[in-house]
Amino acid sequence: MKKSLKITAFLLASVLLAGLFPVASKAEGEKLTGKTAMEITQMMGKGWNLGNTFDATGGSPNNIYSQETSWGNPKVTKELIDGVKAAGFTTIRIPVTWNNFIDKSNGYQIDEAFLNRVNEIVDYAFENDLFVILNVHHEEWVNDKNIHENYEEIGKELHAVWSQLADRFAEYDQHLLFEGMNEPRATGMGYEWTGNQACYEAVNYLDQVFVDCIRNNGKGYNAERALMIPGYAASSSAAVLNSIQIPQYNGKDAENVIISVHCYSPYSFCLTDDQESFNPNNSQDTADITSLIGNLKYLFLDKGIPVVMGECGATNTRDNEDARKLWFTFIGDITRENGIPAVVWDNGAKGNSGGECHNYFERETGEQAYPELLSAFIYGDPEANKPKDIFIDFEPYDEAGATVLATPEQYGFTPKTLTKKAKVNHTKDANVGFSAVIPNSDKSSYVTMDLSKFAGKTINVKLYLKSESQGTVTLGILENESQDLVTAQLDTAWTEVTFSYQFWEDPCERALFFQGDGVDVFYVDDISITMVEEKDRYEAQVLKEGEADGTTEESAANESVEEDSDTESDIASNNGQDEADDAVQQSKPSSETNGSTYQWIIVICIVIALVVIILYIVMVKKKTGKK
């Protein structure tokens, strides 16, 4: 009896105590998984490069810290990575040169101690909920002057290195991205930074080797891991971007592939001391950047292929902080508006001349060296990006092409389509704002209006729609996954549509979308978007159909009733609002509620376990006393 009682008590206590530590299941529930590369890039925001550190090439293979500090930066601490997170960054790129720690005589094995040290920094970033980009960087065996001839040999070592990295980090979720190479190029050749067709093809070959290696690994999250591939030298030139081929896998374009590109434009401002000023209103200063963004949209983004700007930055030239702030605001805004995560290059160099002064953090403490520059990069111009009420009265353009107060392009209206059939046209008709052309047979086409500035806000939307024939147009909010709010029945008369929506705080694409059903062409005008007090709900309805200036008998009757019962309707409205608030609050996931519930479960389990143990001790003592 004593032995049986002892085992029973022990097992019961063990089960109860085991319930206190659901570490594996809880961690699994927090994993980022099942996302497309495009969805991941919309979450990555702005990033920071841990430059001139693990990517340095000095030091001794006998000392894992010597390379890390060989270019003048101190050992990386958790305080530094904490500081990067505190500054507002959501992504960190960890460039690594593995060459000094690769045993080429032993199957290209990476030194375990050095790999552990890199792993330690990745863990610092994961503890801060940062996205992490891990790559191979200044590898002399990649940047072979004869890369166009030796690409197959390079590919063998590239495959061996990435096979080991894939194994080591297999269980790290989609917060970890792999970047196959940094700036693969023919080092020392006259065409080192421009390349030629043979070089372009060599890099495409190596990108394919990299993708095959990770996808064939098949372990952990590697089947869905986002993989970044560069063109030749990660160049922003149109020739290089046009040369990039998406690697194939299982007979089709590989999934979750991201184009990696670097941008130091204009070159004279960003990487030399020749130009101290930058004017965002001067096309001579901005042309290279806007041209790059246009090429990235045309070649990749509009085809559903995401892009990450893995490096960008502007050197400190004689302490030109004001000019650099303008540059960081411009590059930060244009990448944000186009859904491109941008990662600033930081090499820790604190000088103000020489073209390579890209220091933004005090490496020893994690404090920001230039907080205003980083804020401009991450958040943009506070006034320009502050959400404001919008009223758009689209005016027609005249034959001379005179500037008008509002055009669809100015307010972020764009066609979204894989078939290039959707169009947005600013019309000449004085009674029409703009027309959206969406072929009825093309269900993949729709038109969006960018609402990215309204994160965390509740908005009221009012607009007018009509079409050339009878049919319906669905309006919705695009926020991670689309929310269909209104289906409007259209004909040749204007229909007024209103609805409300509350946006979440999470970083993602946000837009108002229009999609036709039985309507090939419809028209939009007089869009009003106003912010309201924070409400944990949304509702949507078509309030009135018919001509915009007309009043139906039903609406007239309603207005008459409302005049006589304002107080009653206000009370009913408030009650309805309270109920809606309660209902949505119950449906929303709440980390605070889940956390407190979990804490109470722990307390209860501890108490029960202690009671069981005490009862066991008492019974054992009684049993002993009887003997």
Image (cartoon, helix red, strand yellow):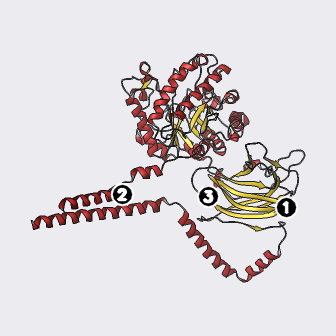
At 77% from the left edge and 50% from the top edge, which residue is drawn?
A: 408
Specify the label residue 79 is tagged with.
Answer: none
CA neighbours of label 1 inside 10 A, class few (<14), some (14 to 19), many (20+): many
Nearer to me, 284 or 127: 127
Nearer to me, 410 or 547: 547
Residue 54 left/right relative to 237: left
Mark 1, residue position: 491
Mark 3, residue position: 503
* Residue type, mark 1 in image: Asp
* Contact between labelled residues 2 and 1, with CB atoms less than 8 Å apart: no
At 71% from the left edge and 66% from the top edge, which residue is drawn?
A: 541
Q: Position of residue 58 (x, y in %)?
A: 44, 23
- Tell me which label, 1 or 3, sits earlier in the chain: 1
Mark 2, residue position: 19
Q: Nearer the viewer, mark 1 or mark 2?
A: 2
Question: Does dot 1 land on a helix, a strand or a loop?
Answer: loop
Q: Position of residue 295 (x, y in %)?
A: 71, 35
Q: How much space separates mark 1 and mark 3, taking CA atoms? A: 31 Å
CA neighbours of label 3 inside 10 A, class few (<14), some (14 to 19), many (20+): many
Quadrant of the rendering where the N terminus is positioned: bottom left
Q: Quadrant of residue 107?
A: top left
CA neighbours of label 2 inside 10 A, class few (<14), some (14 to 19), many (20+): some
Q: Nearer the viewer, mark 3 or mark 2?
A: 2
Q: How much space separates mark 3 and mark 2, taking CA atoms? A: 36 Å
Outermost right residue: 399
